Amino acid sequence: MESSVGGDDLKKVPLLEYRYKDDEDSNEDKPSTSAVVNEAKIQLELGVPVVLMSLLDYSVQIISVAFVGSLGAMNLAGAAMGASFANVFGFAILEGLAGGMETSGGQAHGNGQLHLLGYLLQRGQFILSTFCLPIALLYLHAAWVLRQWGQDEEIAELAGQYVVYLLPGLLATALFLPVAKFLQVQEVTKPLAVVSCTVLILHAPICWLYIYALDLGFVGAAMANSTSNVLTLLLLVLFLKFERSGILERCWLGWSLAAFVNLGSFLSLALAACAMTSFEWWVWEIVQIMAGWLPHPDISVSAMTICFQTVSLCFMPPQGLGTAASIRVSNELGAQRPEKARTAVKVAFILAAVTGGFLAIVLGLVRYHWATFVIDPSETVVIDTFVGLVPLLATCVFANALNGSLSGVLRGSGQQWTGSLVNNFGLYGVSLPLAYLFGIRMQMGLGGLWWGMLIGVIVQLIGQVGLTALTNWEYQAGRALLTVISNSDHVTKSVEYQEKSSIGSESIP
């Protein structure tokens, strides 16, 4: 959306002629306390189910790893490497691409153009399914790729086998992620948490069935993950079919080629959203590899793995709140209420600060208990290494919480490309070089790697704060209106063309 309209176009948009009048809120520079409290309630109602969904989905992976762990260390290593490879180069990419729906979908919903959501759903499923093709080719050659990266021959081969059985789940994910975004942009998130909870309950029996009852071994865990993804898709489809509030009916005009017009605009948003998420996953993987270059790599890699798992787990709540912020900002911009969008941004930042601060404090307080929970208590060196890094991790958790919220704000306002440039400069331009300098060249070890990462995350935060503070929300509301009008015009022309073509073909004897 950043490049879809220009300044001259915006001059033609009557920004003060809002579709909804905001009463007293639109005329105040400072939102009232009641407006802030109400906005906080809305964001929590939207964000908490998304957080629960993320935690439940994460628990599914933990269950799979636990089952594979009983099959031996080599199988566990292969499954863990395969799952990491599949997540970074497959599922994370799809999740990032789906983020492009938050902008156009949220703005269309806010503007009342619900029919565009049905076309957006079809468009999202088409784009994500298409991206599955190159990802599948990469999955099929995962063992070769891992060997080229210097991984152990046997572990790479096992990882390659594991990844292949995740392919059905990859396609199911490409189909259900757009459905999830379709619900989220309409501020419907609770069913997503219910579906995730249902799948989690069923996942352990599914793992047992494949791994033990059918004696499929460690690849049974991958098949169980794929089955759970397919089950998620089916449950969401059943929900849309049988729920009575008309979530689908009010948006669905049937399958149509109109869904495939203006693909370039959607793809631009999707790729930018992907760049904001996938590239961040990749940089953490690179730092994980750096940990293997340190002295005593068995200790450093184990400690770094626990650090990443901890930071990733702590990032899920602010990430869910970031999704809520994206939905609220895009909805209000689409509804031509820039003041409420501005209020949503302020509330999102406050919620992120509170959440990040709470998680950082809790991590500091329970660091020893957490370490002995996730690490074998006999591994005292690894535990001591992890505990010594907790102050850096806690600071990173707090900064990442703010980054997650602001990333959601930038997605909601259609500033993905600018946001991705800021994020990737902080990560690739600052974090990686400093991590290598401190950790490897200056021999500061894991602490040096984390100092480098933390400085980059802070640079990332400063950049996102600056972008958000400089955003002209009236201007962004105008961009949102033009985007909705443009998408609606494209769809209308496509539908009219199809109708004329249909009439013309019927008149031919």
Image (cartoon, rainbow, N blue to C red):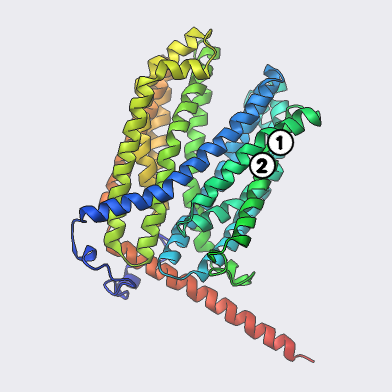
Residue type at tag 2? Ser
Percent coordinates x, y for residue 320 in the rendering: 44, 44
Mark 1 touching mark 2, by CB under 8 A?
Answer: yes
Give me the disc on residue 228. 2
Q: Is mark 2 on a helix, strand or loop?
A: helix
Category of crowding for the residue at label 1, using alpha-carbon neighbours closer than 10 angstroms: few (below 14), some (14–19), many (at least 20)? many
Give me the disc on residue 206. 1
Label count reads 2
Residue type at tag 1? Ile
> Would residue 446 be found to the left or right of residue 194 on screen?
left
Give me the disc on residue 287. none
In the depicted structure, whether residue 29 falls above or below residue 82: below
Q: Nearer the viewer, residue 36 or 328?
A: 36
Q: Compute the Cα span from label 1 to label 2.
A: 8 Å
Residue pictured at 69% horizontal, 26% vertical: 156
Percent coordinates x, y for residue 259 in the rendering: 58, 68
In the depicted structure, whether residue 90 falls above or below residue 161: below
Residue pictured at 52% horizontal, 20% vertical: 374
Q: What element carries label 1?
A: helix
